[in-house]
Amino acid sequence: MHFFVYPALPAEHLYMTRMVHLLPDTDRNAPIECKLSNYDLSVGDGQSHIYEALSYCWESEDKPKSIILNGYKFSVTENLFSALQHLRDRQLPRTLWIDAICINQGTRENDIDEKNKQIPLMRKIYAQAGCVIVWLGDDREDGENALRWINHLAGQQDQSVETSIEYGWSVTSILDMEEGDSIPDAEDQNTEDPAEDDQSTRSSVEGDHSKTDSMTEHDVACSNLLQRDWFRRVWVLQEVGVARYINVLCGSTQISAHAFAEGLARLKLPEPFLSRLGPVTHLIKGAPYRPKFDFSSPGILSLGELLGMYRNYRATLQHDKIYALLGLSTDASADGLKPNYNAPWHHVFREITSHIFPGSSVQTWEDRASAVVKTKGWIMGHVGHVKSSMGEFGRQEITCHFHKSAFSLRETWPSDWMLPACAELVQEGDLICHLQGQSRPSILRLRNDHFSLLSPSLWLRSKDRIKSLSHAFDQGQLDYGHDITITWNIPMDESATKPKGLKLKQITPEVEQSLNEIELQLEIIAQVMLEFANRVLNSRTSPVKAWENTLKQCGTDVSMSEIYKLAMKVIKPKRHFDVISKEPRHIDFIDLLLKYRGESAPDIEMLRWACQDYGHSEFLDLLFKHRAESLLITEEVLKAAAQNDSEFNVIALLEHRRERLLVSEEVLKVAVGNPGSHAPGNLEILLQHAGKNLLISEEMVKSAIENPGQKSGEIVEILLKYGGKDLSISDETVRLAVGESSSNPLWIWNVLVQHRGEDLSISEEIIITAAGNSKNYAPDVLKALFKHGGEDLSIPEGAVKAAAGCRSVPHRILEVLFQHRENLPISEEAIKAAAGNAGHYPHQALKVLFQQRENLPISEEVVKAAAGNPGYFAHEALKVLFRYRENLPVSEEVVKVAVGLTGLLAPEALETLFEHGGENISISEEVIQAAARNDGDKSVQIMQILKMHRQDSAVISQAVLEAASENPKYASEMSFFLNNWHSEQSKAGDNSLGKCD
């Protein structure tokens, strides 16, 4: 049989490859027969294809095996031959992509040209495959049992120690191995003493990780499987790193990639295994969460992403830390990235860094592991929470707390991210930044006066798709905003220490940095700290630990003044003096800020802030704890203390600085206006401290009267007590005391009487003010005035009108007035005021007035006032008027006013008019128009009442319909109702004409 000869692939198709069709056979030992055909990868619009791609190791070519390919003989390695035997189906052909068969591996020039074109397609081939099959080899060294056990562990929800022992496996015994240890054969293990063997297993499971002399056959099988060549093969990072569906196959045993990764996680692998298996397993497990392959995309992982994960891997030459990753990245074909071992390392480092950060300034130096990058960036937020898991192969779950400038991303970007194993673990407080030239965000860490780069471009894995921002930046829709200086460290070896807490000049003394650049970086860091503080202060989910980490990393050259201002603005006072703060994170925030950056604290402003409202006694304690020696108690601070409702703050200030405190008139004014329950006590403490050096003015008394707090009467009493006879009380002050501005008029009046006695005169203006007071206690205030003024106290006519218009209890106030003077004159204006009173008792006020006089004048204006009363009791006021005057006419103007009412009881007022006026009420076109314009919630009901009483006579004109269409709230409902009414009238007219005919 002749050997197979590859026909050339069509040159005009850039994405043409070949597929192997493995033909079925029921006999396992039958010759392997395959068909090879051309395959266009570009067909399918980025969807997964039905072919399967094989990820395997060629292994030795010393003993080739033969298969039949398109009827010709074809040689493959022993490992591939075994894979084909296990992959062959009994009934159906299987479509596969296998590099050794699908790519011409010949050495002729044309063959090499084909290989150079096909190898770049491998990323697309594995990404679009319906499934990637990881072939670990045949069942040597009990590999199938090892794979089955890994699958078993993956299915356990809560693996117990007993279950592990029952299966005869020591789940953690692999921890006892170190890389390089020889693995004993199963038959060499000592199993003569079952009790001793069981004890050894139990101690291992229970956490004794000391090195043991024996391993079970299962441990040996599992460790042998995980040390197969496939796990060391660098190409597998690409093959499984782009796949969406993966199965792992050893011999005849096949499990899903997810089960494989979960099972490995439950083995609790030690660091030697973790460092080797972690990257591959991490990529395998992430396969189901990857988006569908975008054919126009050059690849999955950029060189920056790969370096972020693997830059700390060991390499004989520093160059290999870059070059070993080039073939796996999307940047493999980029100009200037070809391997060049003749160039010094710092030149290579600079070229690679410049490629990753295009448009940036990059500086590197010989014998230094750090590069300095000057670029542009947009700091989106910070890491709020971090959860690391060894069982997840170094992956970290982080929560991104977006800063204000990036709040718009919350709808398109998830806040919970899963990061793969980065070269350096992320911690709370690290910054998330979108750097120029990157398609994904980077992780930065604050380092004194600059930033260090943890990962240049994060390969984020989350439940939601991450939306790229690169296009928005390219189109100018977003602005990077900051010129950022970054250090990026690629250690010379794994033992090299990374610089921490040093200024940029201490890390790289040779760096070129102007004074202006230094100041700019400090400003940027200050802005970042401010954004960070804003999130911590305003969000209950932001841990204070992240804030502490950032404060520790921030250099002392960075100003904290704006952060102190923000804290004083955001942190709210307690709601009551004896309520413990419900925001302990705020206390922790200030405590840390004062601890690490107390020298930046604006002492006076903070003292004033801590004394405001109900006070921050906890924060006062912190200030005296951290800043006791430098605190200065100014007038503004004392005013703030006098303004709050906690006596403890004033006392605390006096205890700390009694000999230096000066109580000014301004401080007393603030204390007098304090509405809190402790305001009188604070005022008296201040007055005692001030002594006789301060004069109490009448203006202070007025302020106390207008104090809305419940203790205003007590404050007035304290002022009168300390003011003495020299404190004048004018008629204006008394009017203020009995008027609506006073929260406690009766108490304050009694205090005035107690301290001024007969010196108090009661003017007509005072009586009118008291009579018009809309508070419920107004009648009692009037009684107190009449008691003090005696029988001879005259009542002006305006008092009746003021009482009639009082919205609270007008009838009670009127009764008090008439009890004191029965023959008080009642004007039409007074009746009108009662009729239009929008309170709850207009009808009661009218009753009291009508009980005093039999023939009081009731004009159309009075009826209109009642009909247009905007309160809930317009109909009750109308009923009282109609009972008092049964023959009161209801004019068109009155009806017009009534149909314009918008209250919930407006229909009742209109019904009352019809009940009284009946057929005598005229409903003109103007009345209908007024009702059509009514935008109240009961407007349609009002129109229904008009129709009920004037079904046929009302004129539904075009002007009425236009008025309805202009109704701002109920145009459609009103128009519908009126059109129906108009139609009914038209039909009635037509019927009438028909009868006449």
Image (spheres, grey):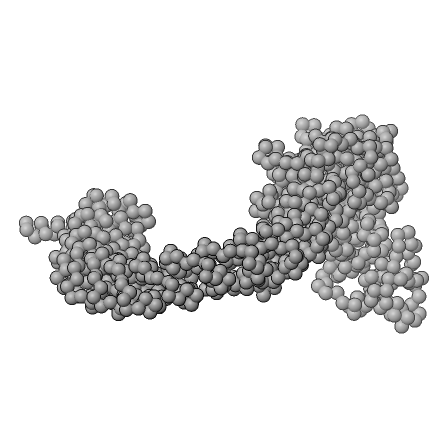
- Pinpoint residue 88: horizontal percent, then vertical percent: 74, 49
- Can residue 36 be seen? no
Locate residue 167: give its quadrant. Answer: bottom right
Looking at the image, the residue that sits furthest to the front is 726
Tell me if 268 is positioned left or right of 438 in this view: right
- Confirm whether residue 364 shows in the render: yes
Q: Which of these two is toward me, 775 or 13?
A: 775
Q: Position of residue 730 (x, y in %)?
A: 39, 57
Give the left or right position of residue 880, taking residue 841 as reference. Answer: left
Residue placed most toward the observer, 97 or 127: 127
In the depicted view, which residue is nearer to us: 948 or 166? 948
Quadrant in which residue 884 is drawn: bottom left
Taking the view exactly as shown, the residue that stands out farthest to the left is 997
> Looking at the image, which residue is at 17% across and 62% down?
856
Q: Residue 815 lies in what quarter of the image?
A: bottom left
The image shows residue 944 at horizontal and vertical percentages of 23, 56
Locate the N terminus by quadrant. Answer: top right
Q: Residue at x 23, y 45 (%)?
A: 961
Q: Identify which residue is drawn at 42% across, 62% down.
A: 743
Q: How many marks?
A: 0
State the residue at coordinates (67%, 48%): 601
Q: Position of residue 46 (x, y in %)?
A: 63, 40
Vertical arrangement, residue 213 with respect to residue 552, above or below: below
